[in-house]
Amino acid sequence: MSRLHRNRARNTEHARSILDPLEYYRQIRRDCIIWNKKHYSGLRFHKRKDPWYKITSGKQYNYEERTMSWGQCVSYFRVPSQSSISVKKTTIVKMTRQKYNSLLIEAKINDWLKKNPRPIEYNPLQPDLFEAEFMLPWIVKHTEAREKIINFVNQIGNKVKVYARYKGDVGYPRKIMEFKSDHQKLMILDGAYANHLWSKSIQKGQRTANILAKINPDFIALKVVDGKQECILVPSLRLKEVA
């Protein structure tokens, strides 16, 4: 049967189901019963007794296969109910920025895994002879994608805060600006400040310090804060010589 004939037959069957409400109802009922048996089978001695049109709620179990630490296991496992899934999708929950970033990273990594699945399924009982040939390139690709996703999420979520100090101030009390972080360390491992040409955050802070020094002669220095990292920036020496 050609594709055209299959589409015509499918459209005719759909039209008949719409014209016959009873048949349409029976089809929906059969699909719901099959779906509930597949996803919510219930416990061994306590089967699911809810009607097919009612969404599941409370503690739900399903007889399925899962990968455990020791290998594959087929048993009755706890699964989230339909009502709990709906509540999670529609309820606004307060969370910290760190937790939100971790959830966003996990979701993006899962999307990447859907587009780039493992070439070989993990099975400790029957290891694959060509696992190294197929898995090593995938592991390298997965590591690079994970680092790129983490850097991207941190760049969106984290912001660099800039504080200014003028004559007569104690510390750095004046917050003048904030911008997105480039997710690079502000300091070198030996403890010395990083070169302003190496980090975009330092480079932007240095330009701001030079501009403030031109505008106000009472300006002393800037403090750039990126998470737990801090860096003090003073105007360049050329500006002082010109002034």
Image (tube, rainbow, N blue to C red):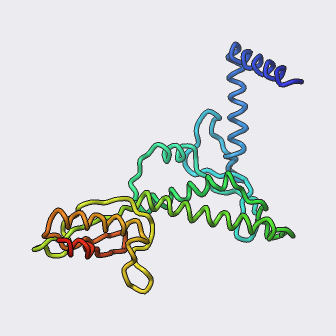
x, y (%) of residue 178?
31, 60
Q: Residue at x 70, y 56 (%)?
A: 76
Tell me the quarter of the image containing the C terminus: bottom left
Q: Nearer the viewer, residue 104 or 177?
A: 177
x, y (%) of residue 59?
58, 52
Tell me the quarter of the image containing the N terminus: top right
Q: Looking at the image, is 13 positioned above or below residue 68? A: above
Q: Looking at the image, is 85 positioned above or below residue 168? A: above
Q: Residue furthest right?
A: 1
State left or right for residue 112 relative to residue 9.
Answer: left
Q: Residue furthest top?
A: 19
Q: Nearer the viewer, residue 98 or 89?
A: 98
State left or right for residue 233 relative to residue 21.
Answer: left
Q: Residue furthest front?
A: 242
Q: Residue at x 59, y 58 (%)?
A: 109
Question: For the image shown, how many numbered marks are present on the structure?
Answer: 0
x, y (%) of residue 181?
40, 63
x, y (%) of residue 224?
31, 70
Q: Residue at x 32, y 70 (%)?
A: 225
Q: Nearer the viewer, residue 9 or 38?
A: 9
Q: Nearer the viewer, residue 227 or 94?
A: 227
State left or right for residue 8 relative to residue 237.
Answer: right
Q: Residue at x 24, y 63 (%)?
A: 211
Within the image, what quadrant is residue 220 found in? bottom left
Within the image, what quadrant is residue 174 found in? bottom left
State left or right for residue 151 relative to residue 203.
Answer: right
